Amino acid sequence: MSIPVLSAIVRHSFWQRGGLLLARLIVAAIFLMACGTKFADIGATATFIANAGFPMAMPLAWIAAIFEALLVIAFLTGILMREAALLAALYLLFLAFAFHGPQNWGGNHMEFGVFVDHFAFAAGLLYMTAFGPGPLGIRR
């Protein structure tokens, strides 16, 4: 496919509306899966948090699950989405270092991969922070 054809595809009006909505739906689905697993077994989440060395693991597990559920609502509706995207990016960077950082890499390439993936996801969230929900988001 030649570059002019590709350029015409990405400039199509779909990406101005549908592309932004699709991105919001993907991000919402990721956070829905994350909070769903937390709510499904909050004890396991608390254990994971405690094993990382954090005190008050059970309250932190509930806070994380509720926060992620609120992110899902923000991304699905577009309400406060820019603020939610910024908070989510900061949250992901915290998670990257706290749970998948250099202290966990010793011979485990998967942990390094998960660490790097958090940065890619955070970059997308920062892009969403800059451009907002698009024309299909509910306005404040």
Image (cartoon, helix red, strand yellow):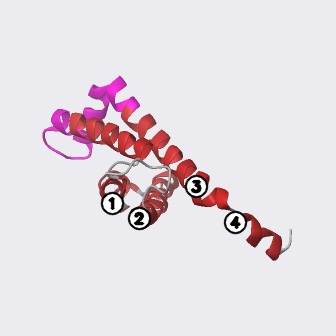
Identify the magenta region. 36-60
**Residue tagged 2:** 126
Question: What residue lies at 66% left-to-right and 61% top-to-bottom?
Answer: 13
Q: Position of residue 58 (x, y in %)?
A: 18, 32
Question: What residue lies at 20% left-to-right and 47% top-to-bottom?
Answer: 53
Q: Which callout, 1 or 2, points at the residue further toward the start of the chain?
A: 1
Q: Position of residue 120 (x, y in %)?
A: 49, 62
Secondary structure of the residue carrying tag 1 is: helix
CA distance for labels 4 and 2:
20 Å
Hey, what amino acid is under mark 2? Answer: Leu
> Depth-wise, is mark 1 or mark 3 nearer the camera?
3
Are dots 1 and 2 in contact, CB under 8 Å? yes
**Residue tagged 3:** 17
* Figure quadrant of residue 125: bottom left
> Depth-wise, is mark 4 or mark 1 nearer the camera?
4
Please indicate whether residue 95 sits to the left or right of residue 55 in the image.
right
Q: Which callout, 2 or 3, points at the residue further toward the start of the chain?
A: 3
Circle 2: is it few (<14), some (14-19), or many (20+) Cα within 10 Å? some
CA distance for labels 4 and 1:
25 Å
Question: Residue 52 bears which disc, if any?
Answer: none
Question: What residue lies at 39% left-to-right and 40% top-to-bottom?
Answer: 72
Hey, what amino acid is under mark 1? Answer: Leu
